[in-house]
Image (spheres, helix red, strand yellow):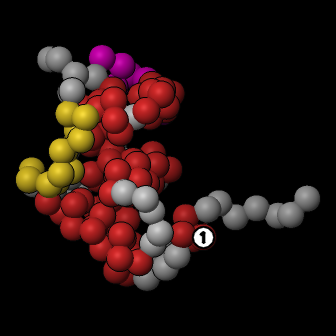
């Protein structure tokens, strides 16, 4: 199967991105798609398109436009070497959507209340 040229948000992930845009500063919605991807990787989410993936119908982005410089594809190759080696952008799309959906759930549940809650805790040097 050929890798994706365009990456799409699902309806559910799009809804979360719109909601995030109301409360958190960002320059465009692609920033929230990237945040969803990072959250999914941080949480160790699988590449299975399960109930947290959502239904097609949200915004569509060019793969090269969302992954400027290829750092997301590189992250996928590091964290998901066996599952995503031949189709990193399909993996990015999956993680982006699942991460946004779960992030939205965590915001609703009060697990996350601010951008600071997404940062790892560490002791000052």
Which of the pair 78/23 is nearer the observer?
23
Q: Residue at x 34, y 35 (%)?
A: 65
Q: Magenta residues, as a range?
A: 79-86
Residue 74: x %, y % from top left:
48, 26
Q: Is residue 116 left or right of residue 111?
A: right
The answer to whether residue 114 is seen in the rendering is: yes
Q: Is residue 80 magenta?
A: yes
Q: Residue at x 41, y 78 (%)?
A: 23
Which of the pair 28/19 is nearer the observer?
28
Does 47 sit above or below residue 50? Answer: above
The answer to whether residue 51 is seen in the rendering is: no
Q: Residue at x 29, y 32 (%)?
A: 63
Numbered marks: total: 1
Which of the pair 2/30 is nearer the observer?
30
* Residue, disc 1: 116
Main secondary structure type of the part rendered in magenta: loop
**Quarter placement of the C terminus:** bottom right
Does 77 sit above or below residue 125? Answer: above
Q: Quadrant of residue 117?
A: bottom right
Q: Is residue 65 magenta?
A: no
**Quarter placement of the N terminus:** top left
Q: Residue at x 50, y 50 (%)?
A: 42
Toward the right, the furthest residue is 125
Q: Is residue 71 left or right of residue 122?
A: left
Q: Is residue 75 left or right of residue 14?
A: right
Q: Secondary structure at mark 1?
A: helix
Residue 9: x %, y % from top left:
21, 50
Residue 39: x %, y % from top left:
45, 54
Crowd tier of the residue under label 1, counting other residues whose Cα lies within 10 Å: few below 14, some 14–19, many 20 or above: few
Does 112 sit above or below residue 120? Answer: below
Q: Quadrant of residue 5?
A: top left
Residue 26: x %, y % from top left:
45, 62
């Amino acid at each position: 199967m050929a890798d994706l040229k365009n990456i799409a948000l699902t309806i559910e992930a799009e809804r979360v991105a719109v909601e995030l845009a109301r409360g958190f500063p960002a320059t465009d919605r692609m920033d929230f798609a990237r945040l969803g991807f990072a959250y999914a990787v941080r949480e160790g989410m699988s590449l299975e398109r399960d109930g947290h993936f959502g239904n097609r119908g949200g915004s569509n982005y060019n793969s090269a436009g969302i992954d400027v410089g290829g750092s997301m594809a590189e992250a996928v190759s590091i964290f998901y070497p066996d599952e995503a080696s031949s189709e990193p952008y399909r993996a990015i799309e999956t993680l982006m959507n699942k991460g946004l959906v779960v992030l939205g759930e965590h915001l609703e549940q009060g697990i996350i209340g601010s951008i600071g809650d997404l940062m790892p805790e560490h002791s000052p040097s």
